[in-house]
Image: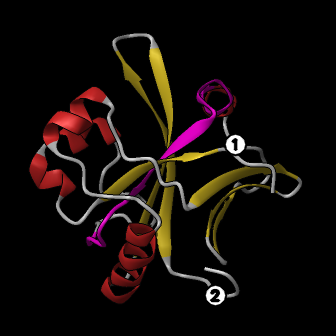
Amino acid sequence: MTGAAIPSRWQVDILVYEDEYSYPVLLLQPGRADDHRQLRRLLGRAGLAAPSTWEWERGFWPLAAGCEVTVTECPAGVTVHVGEHTLRVGFRFEAPPQPWLAAARRQQQVLFVLLPPRPHPAGDALIIDDVSRLVRPAERTGCLAGTIPLGDH
């Protein structure tokens, strides 16, 4: 959030529906339960919600009208703006992956998923390396998801 670093893991991914529609995904997994609760409240007020299995399988996610995503090239990063707060992930030494950027520009939005903190044997890896595993209800426990429009911040 603005001015404060939250220990967390980030990941970008691409979901493909019906072999033709690609959605850019931005995953955030806070390292601490308190941070997850705080972000869940903040993002829930902005319109993100826990998707049902039916919604997740069909790509029907709520629109987070209170949020906006911006992509910067120098320094390279992706920022989620939530009211007066910002959540930013930077990409060391390189820009966000081109296929991800192309999908974001084509869809004019990004699917943002907040994951609950979970221990992981590898210190810097996300517990869910493949976002398609979120189709299982047990994998979505504690998650919030929603599409966030691209902006010009």
Residue that sits furthest to the top in the current view:
19
The residue that label 2 is drawn on is: 4
The picture places residue 45, in percent across and down from the top left corner, at: 42, 71
Q: Residue at x 37, y 68 (%)?
A: 44
The picture places residue 131, in percent across and down from the top left corner, at: 34, 41
Sequence-wise first label, 2 or 1 = 2
Q: Amino acid at mark 2?
A: Ala
Q: Quadrant of residue 61?
A: top left
On the question of residue 123 being in view, the answer is no
**Figure quadrant of the N terminus:** bottom right
How many numbered discs sit on the rendered protein?
2
Q: In what element is the residue under mark 2?
A: loop
Q: Quadrant of residue 15?
A: top left
Specify whether 57 is left or right of 78: left
Q: Is residue 133 above or below residue 124?
A: above
The picture places residue 153, in percent across and down from the top left corner, at: 81, 57
Specify whether 67 is left or right of 131: right
Dot in front, 2 or 1:
2
On the question of residue 81 being in view, the answer is yes
Region in magenta: 103-119
Q: Residue at x 42, y 60 (%)?
A: 47
Q: Name the foreground residue: 134 vs 94.
A: 134
The residue that label 1 is drawn on is: 96
Specify whether 90 is left or right of 74: left
Q: In what element is the residue under mark 1?
A: loop
Q: Amino acid at mark 1?
A: Pro
Mark 2 crowd level (few <14, some 14–19, many ≥20, 10 Å Cα): few
